[in-house]
Image (spheres, helix red, strand yellow):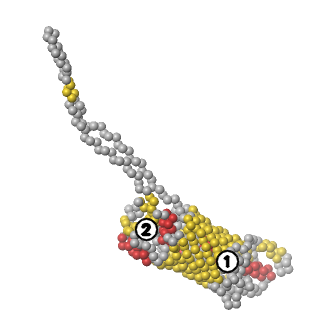
Amino acid sequence: MRRPLPGVLRARRPLSTGLLALSLFASTLYLGVRPAYSDVSVGGNSGSFLQFEIGGRPSGMGGAQVGSAAGIMAQYWNPAALASLEQQQVGAMHAAWLQDLKYEWLGYARPLSPKLGVGSVSLAYFHLPSINGTDAFGNPTGDFKVYDMAFTIGLARNLARGISVGANVKAIRQNLASVSAMGPAVDLGAMATWRGTSFGVVEQNIGPSLSFDGSTSYPLPHQLRLGLSRSVAEGRVLLATDYNMPSDYYKDVRVGAELRAHPNISLRLGYRREIGAGDDPGNGMSYGLGINFRQMNIDYAMTPDNQFADVHRLSFGYSFGSGATEKEPKPKKRPEDKKPAPPAPTGPPVIAEVVPKPVEPKPVKATEVTPKTVALATPTPSPIAQSPAASAPPAAFSDFVIVLPGFSSKETAQAEIKALDLLGFRTKDARIEKDARRGGYSITLTRMNSKGKADEMAASLQRMSFRAVVDLAQK
């Protein structure tokens, strides 16, 4: 038995009735038609397009994102996760299902200030091709469009180390040619990290019912989500699970995993299970692939549908700043010092004294005297200092260190180390040093021989609101 249409339609005009039925059917159809049972509450809602899941990465992990969401698309899954964003980011998604159903999403987020936190905006747009309208007698009335939209503004900020909160405010519009409905909704979320495990909770679509053209009102698809996640295998594997409690359907459990097969490539796998509905077409696996290049990431996900067509999602994100996979900076080689030429000798000059040849008298034969040359020994010049050996090339940089800079005193840095230890980070080798380059004091947390692993650890720290950077370490 398929999931019923929301409510019972009371027609005032044949055209409006047909349009309204089509709209409500379309808004529930693309979410996946599910069997209905008498012991659960199904149907009777509006704004079902708000439940369409955003992002290739989250969908590839089965939708287990409340405790592991990251980047601009965290606005949909848990707005509190945006509190760790340190750079401006833009993202977009396109999803296609049953050829004619399309879903577009565009979002932007940026850090505002330490007090305000991180702000975000997004626009969601679900649409169908133009539909040929007819009246009650089958006469054509012209083409009309069916679409749903939601404009969202969000704000997230850190309350304390490892604890953040966030909220979204939405303006919703569903349009059916001559009839439409508008209304507001709110999302509330929170995240906490303790000993390396992240916990999340979010309540979505809190708001009044929507009414089409003054007819029967339909409630929004309110739902409560709980989730947790943890990185293992030195940050190469992310494991996550969610428990979802919608107001209009079965509760479900989701599990997902993300493997960093390469610093620039991620493989994803997810599974979803509706509790109490073993034959639900929403049950099953999902698959995903992510590619990162410098500041850009591209994510694809495929969610099999056992009853209709598979759902394909393609999304991308761009960060306005240095990406995690930028080329490693290479130390500049200093030219070898040239060996200075030895200075000229500074000793006294050599003086040669020659005895003049005596005048030989004519009458007397005298033995010819050979003039003698007396050479004064030239003093040996002082030994010339040997030229220093050509300076050796700088030591090779092949290791990387995780650094937490910007502490005004050693005491504040020591308090930070205690917080890291409480959150499950290894602080045995951490040391506090005076930072001549950045000013103040910095914590050198650990040393790694892989740029990719160092970037992953720095990203994990940043998600927990630590200010972490990767520096080169000299051997």
Q: Is residue 166 visible?
A: no
* Mark count: 2
Q: Is 232 on the left-hand or right-hand side of 216?
A: left
What number is the disc on residue 30?
none
Give the residue at the far left of this rendering.
364
Dot 1 or dot 2: first in sequence order is 1
Dot 1 amino acid type: Phe
Query: Looking at this view, is 263 or 223 the one in front?
Result: 263
Q: Position of residue 302 (x, y in %)?
A: 66, 71
| Quadrant housing the C terminus | bottom left
State the SS at label 1: helix
Quarter of the view holding residue 217: bottom right
Quickly name the residue at label 1: 49
Q: Is residue 319 above or below residue 275?
A: above
Q: Is 114 on the left-hand or right-hand side of 7?
A: left
Residue appearing at x 44%, y 58% in the figure: 397
Dot 2 amino acid type: Thr
Q: CA distance from mark 1 to mark 2?
A: 46 Å
Q: Position of residue 462 (x, y in %)?
A: 49, 70
| Quadrant housing the N terminus | bottom right
Q: Nearer the viewer, mark 1 or mark 2?
A: 2
Q: Dot 1, how many residues are within 10 Å of its Cα: few (below 14), some (14-19), or many (20+)?
A: many
Residue appearing at x 49%, y 69% in the figure: 457
Residue appearing at x 40%, y 75% in the figure: 418
Q: Is residue 454 visible?
A: yes
Give the residue at the far top of this rendering.
363
State the SS at label 2: strand
Residue appearing at x 80%, y 75% in the figure: 133
Q: Is residue 333 above or below residue 166?
A: above
Quickly name the residue at label 2: 446
Query: Looking at this view, is 163 or 216 the one in front?
Result: 163
Query: Looking at this view, is 421 or 364 the one in front?
Result: 364
